[in-house]
Image (cartoon, rainbow, N blue to C red):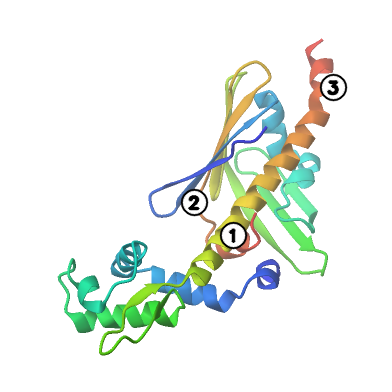
Amino acid sequence: MICYITDVLNMRNLDAAFSALADPTRRALLARLALGEASVMELAKPFEMTQPAISRHLKVLEGAGLIVRRVEGTRRPCRLAPAAISEIDQWLGMLRQALAKNYDRLDDVLATMKPNRRKRRR
Amino acid sequence: MSGLTLTTEGDTHIVVTRRFKAPPEAVYRAHTEPELIRKWLLGPDGWSMPVCLCDARPGGSFRYEWVNEKGNGFHITGEFIALEHFPLNLQHIRNYGSSWRIRRAGRHRAGMRCGSRGFPGSARRLFAAGL
């Protein structure tokens, strides 16, 4: 049924991504990471949360492919994964385009209705 | 004409605003007459609307069925709650899940504000198809 989208994008990634985004703390973490790479300690600072709690949120974001982590000694700094973000963007863009397309077609329909209007007005 | 804008109101309400180079009466007809609706309310390329029933009066029902080139499809149904005519200036259509407000925006120009509150059960299908 949802055939159009599955042709274009991997829905399973999107399910995980939107489910990960459905939490205000995780969205705040992403917003912070949009400014650049950060360690768990740096990410935890603005929140009234323990580092393990933040780590659990990061694990969800990582599982959804929204962030990637690298190893640097004992630290595991996080950064945004542009591919996953752009996948969400593409999906939203597809919705916007389909909507725009409807109304572009409506412009054509309205253009063909003009003669009727003149007739009616006479 | 272009200039489609999308905004959100609250957590569940999407508002689409668009201008048209046509009088509000024509935009209204294009939203209520089946033979006109099925020409444009099609979403992404490759979809058509073989069934378009639209009994545009309060309490009247509508049924839109779409199929794509592969033969897959889905439908939505609903009921008109109110259709209000404010001659020449404002026309308003409200149905089960959404509402359209069509205004005059200059000579032979119409502006439309369309709000969608999500159709229980069919919202996912609707949005998934980009309609």
On screen, residue A36 versus residue B49, left or right, reads: left
Coordinates of residue B83 in the picture (x, y in percent): 59, 34
Which quadrant of the figure contains the N terminus of chain A? bottom right
First-in-chain label (1 vs 2): 2
Give neighbour class at mark 1: few <14, some 14-19, many 20+ (Cα, 10 Å): some
Coordinates of residue A34 in the picture (x, y in percent): 37, 63
The alpha-carbon separation of the residues under discs 3 and 1 comes to: 34 Å
Q: Which mark is residue B117?
A: 2
The vertical placement of A42 against B63, above or below, is: below
The vertical placement of A31 against A38, above or below, is: above
Coordinates of residue B9 in the picture (x, y in percent): 41, 46
Q: As rendered, which of B126 and B19 lies closer to the eye?
A: B19
Q: As rendered, which of B13 and B87 lies closer to the eye?
A: B13
Q: Circle 3 is placed at which residue position?
A: A115
Which chain hosts label 3? A
* Residue B131 in which image quadrant: bottom right
